[in-house]
Amino acid sequence: MNIRFLAKTAGISYIVIFFAAIFANFFVLEALLATPLETVQNNEITVRFGIVAFLLTVFFDVIVAWALFEMYKEHVFTRLSTYLRIMHAAIMGAAIFALPLALKATTADAILHQVEAFNNMWLIGLFFFGGHLILLARIAKPPKWIMIFLTLAGIMYMVDTVAHFIMPNYSEYADVFLMLVAIPSILGEMAFAIWLLLKAGK
């Protein structure tokens, strides 16, 4: 199969994931956490679109996994890397189940309970995604600075997940962990997506 076609497919899918995730996270999930009952009662359609946006991230995550596998299937770690990304997508897909239940809840605590269930499952998925990024940096061999950011992002995804579950006072350091995850992941994954679109396979 044409490598440029696969690279563009992966790159475009990454861009879709990026924008769908921004909407689902910052316009829907954050609203549910800040004002759960008001959001469900007054902005139900926005929440429903957020659920669809999360579904799109899972769908295109599988497409990325397939495209990257086809591009680099000769590498010894590609199959393992693909399995880790598919594991993340599967767990994420299962986690979304909690969000429609939040729409049926009638109290703020019940809504937050479903959102917390979603977040906990997603965190578990991100642990596997972190392993995927660490391997991907070595498999795809993008420019060195992108490789470094992808590796750092992968490590921080895994560290953040572990920290959530072993630190009773995680909330006190949540902003620090958010920055440690967000900076390398945004820079690394967006740069990798652009590299796939413009350079990979040429």
Image: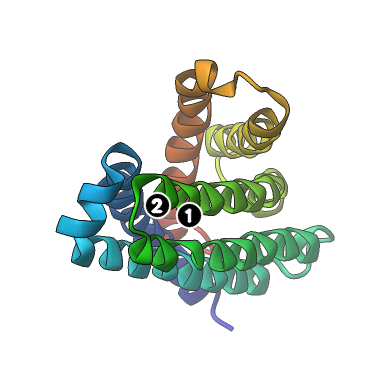
Viewer-side residue, 143 vs 15 = 15
In the rendered structure, which amino acid carries the disc numbered 2? Ile
Q: Where is residue 25 in the image (x, y as percent from the top left)?
A: 35, 48
Q: Is residue 182 above or below residue 96?
A: above
Label 2: state its secondary structure: helix
Q: Which residue is drawn at 33% across and 58% down?
A: 106
* Left or right relative to 13: residue 74: right
Residue occupied by mark 1: 114
* Left or right relative to 131: residue 99: left
Q: Where is residue 88 in the image (x, y as percent from the top left)?
A: 63, 59
Residue occupied by mark 2: 111
Residue found at the far front of this picture: 106
Q: In this view, does 30 lie above or below 80?
A: above
In the rendered structure, which amino acid carries the disc numbered 1? Gln
Q: Total of numbered circles in the picture? A: 2
Viewer-side residue, 25 vs 156 = 25
